[in-house]
Image (tube, grey):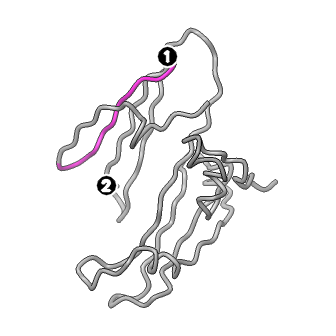
């Protein structure tokens, strides 16, 4: 079964202030809360996801983070996002603490150099992918349900 926690089809409620964005929702006896904050000690943002099982049944869950990365300096000439995204180099590195870590680097030089982004899980990711097709699959447009069969398992 699949349930988006954010975005279309999530059935969530949200609130925000100067320091955070929070979305809450319910699904199949599970209450969830997704909080986005700027990190206190680094130039990064952090998602925290809390899930409370009120169903009366045990369950195993996979939490999958999906982000369409675009690394373009704001304020410069904005160009078509498909054009910019084709110049992003993506790599998956394996870290003993964080598991699979996705690294993205813009290969088109910007005024400040080459923007980059690293996505990691503090609890350790068991797999990663660099192509949306590996997550969404061939039938997503038809069914609205990701296939996610191509997500690469962690090494070792």
> Circle 2: is it few (<14), some (14-19), or many (20+) Cα within 10 Å?
some
Residue 38: image tag: 2
- Judge whether residue 27 is colored magenta: yes
Q: Is residue 105 above or below residue 29?
A: below
Q: Position of residue 152 (x, y in %)?
A: 73, 55
The residue under label 1 is: 29
Q: Position of residue 70 (x, y in %)?
A: 42, 70
- Judge whether residue 137 is colored magenta: no
Q: Quadrant of residue 12?
A: top left
- Whole-Å distance between the Cαs marked 2 and 1? 30 Å
Q: Residue at x 40, y 88 (%)?
A: 113
View extreme (top): residue: 56
Magenta region, residue range: 18-29
Foreground residue among 85 and 106 = 85
- Name which of mark 2 and mark 1 comes first in the sequence: 1
Q: Position of residue 36 (x, y in %)?
A: 34, 47
Main secondary structure found in the magenta portion? strand
């Amino acid at each position: 079964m699949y349930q988006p926690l954010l975005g279309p089809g999530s059935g969530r409620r949200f609130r925000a202030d100067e320091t955070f964005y929070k979305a809450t929702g319910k699904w199949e006896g599970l209450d969830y809360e997704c909080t986005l904050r700027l990190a206190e000690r680094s130039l990064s943002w952090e998602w925290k996801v809390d899930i409370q099982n009120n169903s009366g049944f045990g369950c195993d869950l996979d939490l999958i983070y999906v982000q369409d990365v675009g690394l373009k300096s704001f304020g410069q000439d904005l160009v078509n996002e498909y054009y910019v995204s084709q110049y992003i180099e993506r790599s998956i590195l394996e870290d003993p603490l964080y598991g699979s870590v996705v690294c993205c680097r813009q290969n088109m030089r910007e005024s400040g150099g080459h923007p980059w982004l690293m996505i990691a899980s503090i609890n350790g990711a068991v797999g990663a992918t660099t192509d949306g097709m590996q997550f969404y699959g061939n039938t997503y447009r038809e069914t609205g349900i990701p296939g996610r069969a191509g997500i690469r398992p962690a090494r070792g």
